[in-house]
Image (cartoon, rainbow, N blue to C red):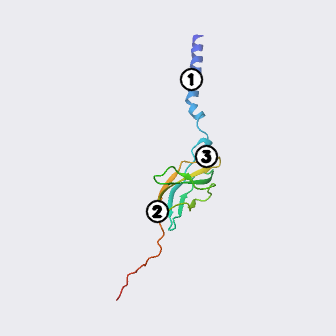
Amino acid sequence: MAFRKQAALALALASVIMFLGCADEINAPTTDEQPVLPPTNVSAFAMSDGTVRVKWDASSELTINGYNVYRREVGHGSPKRVNDSRILETQYLDNGTAVPKEYEYRVTAVNSKGKESHWSSVLVTTRQAVTGGDIRLPVFTD
């Protein structure tokens, strides 16, 4: 009789230990709770008129339905979103810059549930267009 009680107690204890050991798997985040994969290879090109073209490679996540671009002037405050609605392409043309200034751009991916990824960033310095002046080319003689 004592053996049966000990066996039943051991079996119950093993079941509890097994259940607790699997609790991490039971409580593991679902796909909805997984982090959203960010875009990669973010680059920015300052054009001569001060406009900045920001480009990136798409997130490899299948549920992405757009991107957000954030901008801040380096040394001044936190980034602010510059797009009014989600960007569907993998580039953005920013006309809201001044010259000559240095900006940080951050790009995030947004999945179909509206969850935003961590950002990928790049720095760029805007420049003023070269206008006027006299350009002299060297003259070669034989």
The quadrant in which residue 135 appears is: bottom left
Q: Which of marks 3 and 1 is nearer the N terminus?
A: 1
Look at mark 1 in the image and give the residue it sits on. 14
Q: Which of 25 and 45 is in front in this view?
A: 45
Look at mark 2 in the image and give the residue it sits on. 100
Please tell me whether mark 1 or mark 2 is closer to you in this view.
Answer: 2
Tags 3 and 2 touching, CB below 8 Å: no
At label 1, the amino acid type is Ala
At label 3, the amino acid type is Lys
Q: Which of 24 and 70 is in front in this view?
A: 70
Q: Is mark 1 on a helix, strand or loop?
A: helix
Q: Which of marks 3 and 2 is nearer the N terminus?
A: 2
Give the residue displayed 56% in from the left and 27% down from the top.
20
- Against 5, residue 82 (above or below) is below
Q: Which of 60 and 94 is in front in this view?
A: 94
Q: Which mark is residue 115?
A: 3
Q: Position of residue 130 (x, y in %)?
A: 46, 71
Q: Is mark 2 on a helix, strand or loop?
A: loop
Q: Where is residue 2 in the image (x, y as percent from the top left)?
A: 58, 11
User: Real-space Cα distance between discs 1 and 2?
Assistant: 69 Å
At label 2, the amino acid type is Pro
